[in-house]
Amino acid sequence: MTYLTTRTATLAAMLCAGAAYGQDAETGSAGTVETRDDTYLQSVEDVDVRTADGEKIGEVEEILIDAEGNPAGFLLEIGGFLDLGDSDVSVPLEALTWSGSHYVSKMTVEQLERLQPFDE
C-alpha cells in the first residue's frame, strides 16, 4: 500500500511541476525556465516575432529540423486576426534574432507575406 501511495504522490508532483514550465500566452513571458547541465531551456512556441520598429508581425509556431535532426528554420504564423486569415511560412534560422523577450525579423512584412505558404 505504501508503494502505491508514494508512486501516486510522485506522479502528482511531476504533473504539477510540469505546468510551471512554458510560456504564458497572455503576457508572452517565458515564466519559469528549466535548466539541465547548465543549459538554458525555454519553449519558443507562440513567441512574438516583431519588426525592428517593434510592430508585431506574427508568432513562432515551431522550430523546423533537417534530415539529421538539427534546427534548420522557424515556422512562423503571420497575418490574420484571431487565427483567421493567417498563414504559416518557413524562414531560415538566420532570418530572426532574439531580443530577450521576442524575435526580431530581418525580413520585412512584405517579404514574409510573399513567401510560399508552408503546407504541413
Image (cartoon, rainbow, N blue to C red):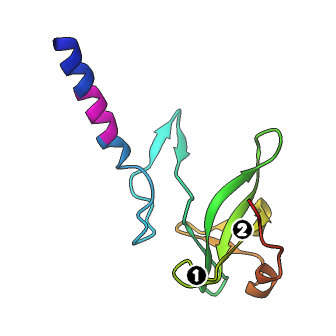
Q: Position of residue 58 (x, y in %)?
A: 62, 76
Label disc, if present, on residue 55 of the rendered structure: none
SS at mark 2 in the image? strand
Determine the residue positioned at 58% across, 81% down.
84
Q: Assess whether residue 118 is covered by the magenta stretch.
A: no
Compared with 82, 36 (above or below) is above
Determine the residue positioned at 45% across, 69% down.
28
Query: Toward which corner of the image does residue 2 lie, by quadrant?
Result: top left
Q: Assess whether residue 10 is covered by the magenta stretch.
A: yes
Q: Principal SS element in the magenta part? A: helix
Spatial CA distance of label 2 from label 1 is: 24 Å
Mark 2: amino acid: Leu
Q: Position of residue 59 (x, y in %)?
A: 60, 71
Left or right: 28, with 116 as reference point: left
Q: Position of residue 89 (x, y in %)?
A: 75, 70
Compared with 44, 96 (above or below) is below
Mark 1: amino acid: Leu
Quadrant into which the C terminus falls = bottom right
Q: Nearer the viewer, residue 5 or 91?
A: 5
Q: In terms of sequence position, does the residue under pointer 2 or pointer 1 come before the other?
A: 1
Magenta part of the protein: which range? 9-15
Residue under circle 2? 96
Residue under circle 1? 84
